[in-house]
Amino acid sequence: MPNTPRVKRLIRQAIAEDLGQGDMTTEGLIPETQQSKALVTAKARGIIAGTEIAKQVFLEVDPKLEVDILIKDGTEVKPGDVIARIEGKTASILKAERVALNFLQRLSGIASETARYVQAVKGLPVLITDTRKTTPGLRTLEKYAVRVGGGKNHRMNLADGILIKDNHIAVLRHRGLSIKEIVAKARHKASPELKIEIEVKTPEEASQAAEAGADIVMLDNMNLKDMRQAVRLVKGRALIEASGGITLESVRDVAKTGVDLISIGALTHSPKALDISLELELF
Amino acid sequence: MPNTPRVKRLIRQAIAEDLGQGDMTTEGLIPETQQSKALVTAKARGIIAGTEIAKQVFLEVDPKLEVDILIKDGTEVKPGDVIARIEGKTASILKAERVALNFLQRLSGIASETARYVQAVKGLPVLITDTRKTTPGLRTLEKYAVRVGGGKNHRMNLADGILIKDNHIAVLRHRGLSIKEIVAKARHKASPELKIEIEVKTPEEASQAAEAGADIVMLDNMNLKDMRQAVRLVKGRALIEASGGITLESVRDVAKTGVDLISIGALTHSPKALDISLELELF
Amino acid sequence: MPNTPRVKRLIRQAIAEDLGQGDMTTEGLIPETQQSKALVTAKARGIIAGTEIAKQVFLEVDPKLEVDILIKDGTEVKPGDVIARIEGKTASILKAERVALNFLQRLSGIASETARYVQAVKGLPVLITDTRKTTPGLRTLEKYAVRVGGGKNHRMNLADGILIKDNHIAVLRHRGLSIKEIVAKARHKASPELKIEIEVKTPEEASQAAEAGADIVMLDNMNLKDMRQAVRLVKGRALIEASGGITLESVRDVAKTGVDLISIGALTHSPKALDISLELELF
Amino acid sequence: MPNTPRVKRLIRQAIAEDLGQGDMTTEGLIPETQQSKALVTAKARGIIAGTEIAKQVFLEVDPKLEVDILIKDGTEVKPGDVIARIEGKTASILKAERVALNFLQRLSGIASETARYVQAVKGLPVLITDTRKTTPGLRTLEKYAVRVGGGKNHRMNLADGILIKDNHIAVLRHRGLSIKEIVAKARHKASPELKIEIEVKTPEEASQAAEAGADIVMLDNMNLKDMRQAVRLVKGRALIEASGGITLESVRDVAKTGVDLISIGALTHSPKALDISLELELF
Amino acid sequence: MPNTPRVKRLIRQAIAEDLGQGDMTTEGLIPETQQSKALVTAKARGIIAGTEIAKQVFLEVDPKLEVDILIKDGTEVKPGDVIARIEGKTASILKAERVALNFLQRLSGIASETARYVQAVKGLPVLITDTRKTTPGLRTLEKYAVRVGGGKNHRMNLADGILIKDNHIAVLRHRGLSIKEIVAKARHKASPELKIEIEVKTPEEASQAAEAGADIVMLDNMNLKDMRQAVRLVKGRALIEASGGITLESVRDVAKTGVDLISIGALTHSPKALDISLELELF
Amino acid sequence: MPNTPRVKRLIRQAIAEDLGQGDMTTEGLIPETQQSKALVTAKARGIIAGTEIAKQVFLEVDPKLEVDILIKDGTEVKPGDVIARIEGKTASILKAERVALNFLQRLSGIASETARYVQAVKGLPVLITDTRKTTPGLRTLEKYAVRVGGGKNHRMNLADGILIKDNHIAVLRHRGLSIKEIVAKARHKASPELKIEIEVKTPEEASQAAEAGADIVMLDNMNLKDMRQAVRLVKGRALIEASGGITLESVRDVAKTGVDLISIGALTHSPKALDISLELELF
């Protein structure tokens, strides 16, 4: 669970955003002394992710709430499964409800979508990875949800991997460098701690990149035939990643080409939120 | 365009999140003196929203970039339409690219989805509204994108409207209050500046709520028949809002019941990002 | 009690502002092991507001302090009444003292001033409200103090109500719009969740505004005779608010005109702090 | 002008607080292309302070506004005097108006109140100073306004001066230390860069404090006779400060006792805001 | 221990900086249920400072860790001395380790270096002080470490002392002011709470400064002979500070000239970190 | 130049830290209209790093200053070399001076120290790298300074590389895993984008680690003989890093063993600041 200071700050900002100057409905109607239990319940099938974040939202609003997570991140749920039970001041539960659910629904949506891709390539020696196409401000959490769903993370940010993309290559080719020279230049400049990945358009470029010592070769929007050819040329010398427009329908065919990694932007840029609700139990 | 200090802070945080300790690929490979033009281009059909945010991302990374917005928010685009042109230091453009696109693709996705709902009810006297089911930290922007797509905003946060929901009502009923007494209590407690909305389950409750002086009555997950009945009972005394599980398929039928407002959580919790790319032009 | 993340941030900033690099007097003179009790005591008559904020200041400085609030917000005190009792490390109490009192004295001053206005209109069907003339950074707390003193809140910020002021009207009139057209335009553009208020100068404008569907009509700096005329024309169609230069001396006469709301900027821009002190008890 | 990063942060927070999710009235009604001039005008007599802060508020909302300060901080104004002229996008001016005025009115109120005290002791060799009884978050600005009004600043925070107050003394006496030993201990512990001030209740204590080497002796709530006696005993060995319950009525008599400094909490905890308004000029 | 909100913020930022998106090694390898003890041990001789900060780092990462400080700040340690014992979740200890040690090693390095200077002047009536040459962001902590090492603090920041330096004097001389006039002007303008210090180049200037009423005279880069002469001329009228290029080798000779204060930039700008390590004990 | 939002925030915080409530000396003595030139000059030999940061400090204090960098980062300077020239308001230059120099002196100190190590291994196929032993809050800048000095960066933070250290290994061995199993587990869990490094104590462990597929093997505190043996066993299968207690005296001998990387904590935890000063030129 990525419980970093920046995640804590995001939680505080999200509560601030939703509370504004205070929950005027609850303050006006719910007695300060009223206590409740509440159940957080799945209303659709999927993989749960973000329970600890939801818990922190409740505790940030009121540290005296008791929050019991009943279903751990990574578990598959069906409608009616109780994910968490909260007990304490009713007003606090209601103030925290929407923000907690907004996190939980989004992250569970990502984990569920990832799991669908992972399931689609089951049995094949390939990893499903995310991209940097995440929601601004939520990358740490969204990449965590991908891991919960069985995926792997691609680069976290621009500092922790060298990825030479089409735009970089265009500039460098314009200055007369070959793929080989580009990779060599990157190797010379980069931290020895970082892997070097390069985006290529053809099997030939893939081969040149591997020969030049790239750690990962990204096949950008190639068709299946070219992918197979690239795998033949590169396999064993570098990791091979397929990228670009791959869907739940096409992912297994891509996997069968023999690539090592398949990166899917849609895991984080277009997931469907998982339906989850909170209901009070009075006592 | 919601150019608030908190939006500016979000932009800075999103850049920080993506840059980490710096763009190691670009710093290693692209000469500091290299200048480029770049085009931001639509790769799918949809409504554009967030161009000013994207522009601010580029300018936050490098205030010397020239950013020309060619297509204003709210415009419908088709694949190949150029949305913006950027000119300046290549390294700056590449550092800002992903964050700018992440904002632009998400907000355009929301505007596009909203526009589909608005289109679906065309000609009927009803408004499509959002909910508080927004991405944590992005509410101001996401609600702006809904407006760009032709929708209206529901409450911005818990302070700027009284919305008495099922959980509130459960507590108050448990303490012996009727719908009428609940609305009266809310009216007495609330700021006179705020509208009072209440969620009801039956046409009868809707009628009681209107009689008690609620400004808006929310029909929660009612079937079409009950909605029509509620409209008959309430129309003219309060605004009527339909809410809960309404889809692009069902929205026109709901609208035909005569409700004034239809709120759709999916506008912001599950939009599909609009595909948009950035390509350098060298010179 | 508006215990939002932004209020917590304000508390931290206020402590940082007062502590600087540390309390050099206390660190130099008071042994780390010294324990004390302290009493927070009223030294003047008034209404207490902000006890929970004061408590949070003490706990932010030292979470091990025991802070007992003896008098709840909204209570009237006289000199000598003990508001709170604190027990724990002497150095912590002394570090927190000034910031805690600065909050408590200011908020109690606002509550006390509000209560004087509310008392002045006792028995009349009118509400006393605040304005946006609050101290930068303290709005949430100052508006809370107004509620504690028996007042109601006007708009919290520019997003949660439509208030068409003289400057807006001047622009729109200059472009040829009538009061009626202005209100209609606002209604068309605004969220259906928001009330529409408009500032008017004459009873006739008030009547036009009500006819056009304004929810609230603000009578700006009108004399009593005009106010009575406006009330006659508008009553029942919209809420009527009196605003501008109303004092403790004039407020009852204004209330007798039949307006529904009286807004008073001085509640928050010029309150007199309530005198409150902290004294140690040694043991 | 205290243009520190923390002041800039306060300005951003104040704008955020007032804007919320955006100025819905202005966005709905005022065309983006509309340009205006606006005049900021005094509506009461007083000393202006905070013009640069007001200017920064306008520029933070829209860097393209032209803001001309016509009356410098420290100038006395009368009703009708134009303090500043702003030109640019109408919507920007209206969004910034309230926050800019809230700063300007409060700071001018403090400067005006300070000037009244300074005027009251005119011709006597005494300085009027503020205290730490400032509004949480605004200390830098409020202490600046005191200087604008002709006053001097007491300690900025707990780190930049040693002030041994009644509560410190109570603890140390309880442990058997004399005034002399307390001052000696403070001198030994404190940074040599800091002055040492001690609060005393009687002329005798004042004398002991001076003898012990205190730099400043604060006469706490003494009557005039005791003050005169304390001045006789201490003058020339330490600065003498009168403090506690001194009003505009009593300040000159206090000054005549011969004290060097008179500190007034009310300068910052209870000033009356100076009435200032903004009106658009259309073109 | 300077436990201010800004120090707490620095701790959070330092953890954020080191954690990035999470400790991928520990998350991948160490079971969530694994518990450990850990010992923080000195590996070199020196003075310990910053134990409370290190403790806060561990608690910020995981509030459930038990952290026992065994050696208080200011204690001299030798290799093998156990400074603290931590018990709890292994993963939490490992996540916090580096940041905690980075603080502890740097602050102990400063305290150790200070103690060497203090030791070097032992028996002489002189104080060793720091300067404003501190690491950006760490001043509060670094100045605390100087105090721990037996030194005194010079000015904390530009607001809490008047220090007229060579560049100020150059400007003012250029405008025709003498040292005496400069000091007089400073006295007139400054808060009466602040001491006035002036930097001088010659014994004659030192004497003029003292005569003009400076509280502290700083002898800038003078040779020993000039220092002795300056002490003769100034002693008893103002504190005398030696500054500029003083080393561990020369400091005792400087002290013997009779100056009251010796300020050493190197205490904070070039300390050698004290070697300290953390080792797990498994159970 | 790592011009990230977090670096900008650090600059603002450092200015805030040094300014406090304002530069009282400069505000009291230097006329607002006074203009100056200033030269930033080296006073010792070394490699300059941080000129852009220093420039940003000046511009953050006053955007109207003209700051010309005359010597680029990475240049070797000798006493008297002019690094930058600033022109504008004297008061602004003096307010920014200390913070700008504090950054510049520290970063240049790190670059200079790094360059000494790089020089010491000149001609040998080895890279000098830093560690995570950086000053809290300054890592981005300090790692940049290492690059300026000719070094390479080790991991930026805990998320961007897998480094299995002695404490991890102890836990996993305690649970019965071999080096081989540990590396395999790490490979299975980690992102495919990340390199896997493992710390070993003996040549045999080094060999096992390489065989298990580690990308980098860190030889922890080995003697030269063991290093040579480890190199023989591992070379060509993984990068080899020497770490622990390596000094300027020993570094060349270590390099001659054939290791690929030598990491040096002292580059960032104990650098000596480079002496640099700012002098005004009046006109």
Image (spheres, coloured by chain):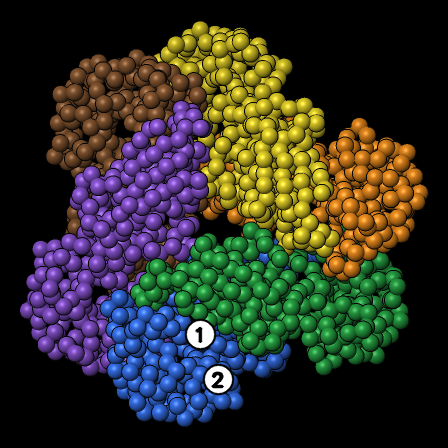
Chain colours: A blue, B green, C orange, D yellow, E brown, F purple
- Chain of the residue that carries numbered disc 1 in the rendered image: A
Q: Is residue C246 visible?
A: yes
x and y, in percent, of residue D106 in the image: 61, 32
In the rendered view, would you say D280 is above or below F193?
A: above
Let me know if residue D196 appears in the view: no
Q: Earlier in the sequence, mark 2 or mark 1?
A: 1
- Using the image, name the chain to which the residue with label 2 belongs: A
Q: Residues within 10 Å of mark 1 (few under 14, many from 20)?
A: many
Work out whether A199 lies above or below D174.
Answer: below
* In front of the other: B277 or E212: B277
Is B234 displayed left or right of F161 in the figure?
A: right
The residue type indicated by label 1 comes to: Thr
Residue at (75, 59) in percent of width and height = C189
Identify the image quadrant of the C terminus of chain A: bottom right
Residue for point 86% across, 71% down: B231
Q: Secondary structure at mark 2?
A: loop
Q: Which residue is mark 2?
A: A246
Residue B189 % position (x, y): 76, 50
- Residue D116: image quadrant is top right
- Identity of the residue drawn at 38% across and 55% down: F3
**Of the pair F187 and A42, the residue shown nearer to us:** F187
**Relative side of A193 to D276, left or right:** left
**Residue D218, how many percent across, how many down?**
46, 19
Describe residue F96's horizontal placement relative to residue F82 as left or right. right
Indicate the quadrant where residue C128 lies.
top right
The numbered dot on residue D197 is none
| Amino acid identity at mark 2 | Ile
* x and y, in percent, of residue A60 in the image: 53, 57
Label drawn at residue A131: 1
